[in-house]
Image: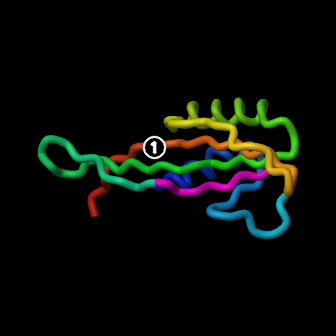
């Protein structure tokens, strides 16, 4: 149970290079960087943690129009059981010529017995 693994599995068929934290090496015209944002426990009335909520931000970088890819990623995440908590255009990076678009996703997991 890992949000990063689930994201990687969902996005593998899309065929865009993906890395966590920062893209190493020379970046292609399109790539995704995943940044983990939170990993928290969800408590209930018995004050016991029953669920883990993990969140991550996917930063899509593309030198092309990002609209079609944004729609494709949204469909993939929703079909894969993810909750999209935010989508936003970050901006055009003049120095690199990339459009930067962010999609924040969340997934809830049941606690596993250790």
Question: How many marks can you see?
Answer: 1
Closer to us: 83 or 67: 67
Image coords of residue 36 (percent x, y): 53, 57
Vertical relation: 23 (above or below) 106:
below
**Residue at position x 85%, y 51% in the image:** 94
Q: Quadrant of residue 14?
A: top right
- Give the side of residue 52 with respect to residue 100, left or right: left
Q: Which residues are magenta?
A: 28-37
**Residue at position x 75%, y 68% in the image:** 24
Closer to us: 35 or 91: 91
Q: Quadrant of residue 102?
A: top right
Return the residue found at the far front.
Answer: 94
Return the residue found at the far bottom.
Answer: 25
Image coords of residue 98 (percent x, y): 82, 49
Colouring method of the image? rainbow
Closer to us: 12 or 63: 63
Residue position for label 1: 107
**Residue at position x 70%, y 42% in the image:** 101
Closer to us: 38 or 17: 38
**Is the magenta region chiefly helix, strand or loop?**
strand
The quadrant of the image that shows the C terminus is bottom left
């Amino acid at each position: 149970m890992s949000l990063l693994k689930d994201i990687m599995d969902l996005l593998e068929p899309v065929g865009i290079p993906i890395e966590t934290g920062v893209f190493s090496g020379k970046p292609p015209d399109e790539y995704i960087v995943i940044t983990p944002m939170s990993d928290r426990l969800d408590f209930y009335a018995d004050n016991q943690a029953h669920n883990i909520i993990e969140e991550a931000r996917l930063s899509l970088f593309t030198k092309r129009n990002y609209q079609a890819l944004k729609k494709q990623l949204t469909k993939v995440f929703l079909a894969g059981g993810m909750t999209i908590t935010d989508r936003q255009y970050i901006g055009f990076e003049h120095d690199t010529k990339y459009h930067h678009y962010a999609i924040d996703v969340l997934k809830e997991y049941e606690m596993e017995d250790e």
